[in-house]
Structure formats: structure tokens, C-alpha cells
Image: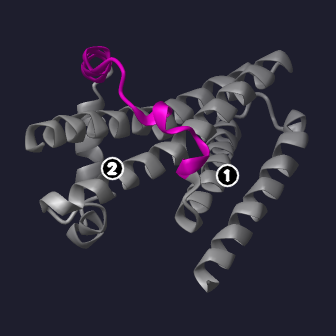
């Protein structure tokens, strides 16, 4: 209960901070690349954090209909996975953030019965990235319309790496899990 309360408060705090930052965004230095990169990164961290904390506290992935999580065109997903070099991104994550075997076991214990937990975790992870990706894409359009095109580009690039690639990765995981489950059935 304490963890859920803390994560909820953290999510609300990030909503407030995101709002404050966005309403003051037109005051940033337009020619200072250091400031622009930092603000683009902070926007991505704040907005992605809102949904990450929500997913850690609640089964928020259930807010999207189950048909959203169904992979309808696996061949197209595989093609984009390869074109965009998402495998390189996956290897980077495994070499850095996901190197910890204990953390990996929380998602998948290596056994047949662990596949359902892996699917749930993949859906939660995807939810934690698809909504921030959408909001940050809209924010990028807004930044462009108010003349902050450098910040828009930086924010968009961080958004691609921090949200779009994880969405593709989670969808690819589920596609592979679905194929395994079909073989086991």
C-alpha cells in the first residue's frame, strides 16, 4: 500500500512538473544546445515517468483494449524491427539496464508457466511507453508551431529512442511468445 501511494504521488508530481515546464517552455534559450538537449531529455523523462509510475502501481495496461495488444501483422513488425535495428537497442538494454539477472527473473522465470507473466509485463511495459510516445509526439508538433524547432527535434529523437523503440521491442516479444504458446497448445 505504501509503495502504491508513493508511486501515485510520484506520478502526480511528474504531471505537475511537466505542466510547469511546458507552460514556461517559450522562455528557454533558443540557441544554447546544452539547455535544449537537457530540456528535451527532461520532457521525455517527466512524461514517460508519469506512465511508468502508474504501471508500477496499477494494472494500467488494462486501460487499453485487449485487441490493441494483439499482433495483427507479425511479418510487418519483423520487417520494421529489422529496418530500424531494434535488435541493437535490445542488446544495449541487456548489456546495461537489464544486465541484472534478478531483475530479469521478475519478468520471466524461464519456465512454461512464466510465459503468462512475461506477456503481462510486456503489455505493462508497452503501455508505459505508447502513451508517452503519443503525448511527446503531440508536444513535438506544439514545439514546432511555437518556433522551438531545435527543441522539437531533440525531444522527438529522445522520444524515438526512449519510447518508440521500447514499444516495438515489447510488441516483438509478444509476437514471439504468441508463437511459442501456439506450438505448446
Comparing marks 1 and 2, which lies closer to the viewer? 2
Extent of the magenta region: 61-83
- Residue 20 drawn at (x, y percent): 87, 50
Answer above or below: position of 104 versus 125: below
Can residue 24 be seen here? The reply is: no
Q: Classify 10 Å Cα crowding around label 2: few (below 14), some (14-19), many (20 and above).
A: many
- Looking at the image, the residue that sits furthest to the front is 185
Coloration of the structure image: one colour
Residue 28, can we see it?
yes
* Coordinates of residue 106 in the picture (x, y in percent): 30, 68
Magenta stretch prevailing secondary structure? helix
Q: Residue at x 9, y 44 (%)?
A: 184
- Which residue is pictured at 66% across the width and 77% down the height? 6
Looking at this view, name the residue that lies furthest to the left: 183
Image quarter where the C terminus lies is: top left
In the picture, measured across the screen, residue 28 lies left or right of residue 45, that is right
Report the residue marked by disc 2.
119
* SS state under label 2: helix
Packing grade of label 1 (10 A; few <14, some 14-19, many >=20) is: many
| Nearest to the observer: residue 54 or residue 166 | 54
Q: Which residue is mark 1?
A: 46
Whether 161 is among the magenta residues is no
Q: Which of marks 2 and 1 precedes in the sequence?
A: 1
Percent position of residue 108, x then y: 23, 61
Q: Residue at x 68, y 77 (%)?
A: 5
Q: Secondary structure at mark 1?
A: helix
Q: Residue at x 86, y 21 (%)?
A: 146
Amino acid at each position: 500500500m505504501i509503495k502504491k501511494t508513493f508511486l501515485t504521488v510520484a506520478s502526480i508530481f511528474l504531471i505537475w512538473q511537466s505542466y510547469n515546464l511546458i507552460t514556461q517552455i517559450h522562455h528557454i534559450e533558443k540557441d544554447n544546445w546544452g539547455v535544449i538537449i537537457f530540456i528535451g531529455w527532461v520532457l521525455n523523462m517527466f512524461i514517460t515517468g508519469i506512465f511508468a509510475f502508474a504501471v508500477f502501481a496499477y494494472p494500467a495496461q488494462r486501460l487499453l483494449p485487449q485487441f490493441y495488444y494483439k499482433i495483427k501483422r507479425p511479418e510487418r513488425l519483423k520487417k520494421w524491427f529489422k529496418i530500424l535495428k531494434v535488435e541493437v537497442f535490445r542488446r544495449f538494454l541487456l548489456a546495461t539496464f537489464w544486465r541484472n539477472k534478478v531483475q530479469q527473473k521478475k519478468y520471466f522465470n524461464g519456465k512454461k508457466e512464466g510465459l503468462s507473466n512475461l506477456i503481462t509485463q510486456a503489455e505493462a511495459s508497452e503501455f508505459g511507453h505508447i502513451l508517452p510516445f503519443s503525448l511527446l509526439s503531440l508536444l513535438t508538433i506544439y514545439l514546432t508551431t511555437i518556433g522551438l524547432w531545435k527543441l522539437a527535434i531533440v525531444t522527438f529523437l529522445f522520444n524515438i529512442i526512449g519510447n518508440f523503440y521500447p514499444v516495438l521491442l515489447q510488441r516483438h516479444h509478444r509476437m514471439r511468445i504468441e508463437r511459442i504458446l501456439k506450438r505448446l497448445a
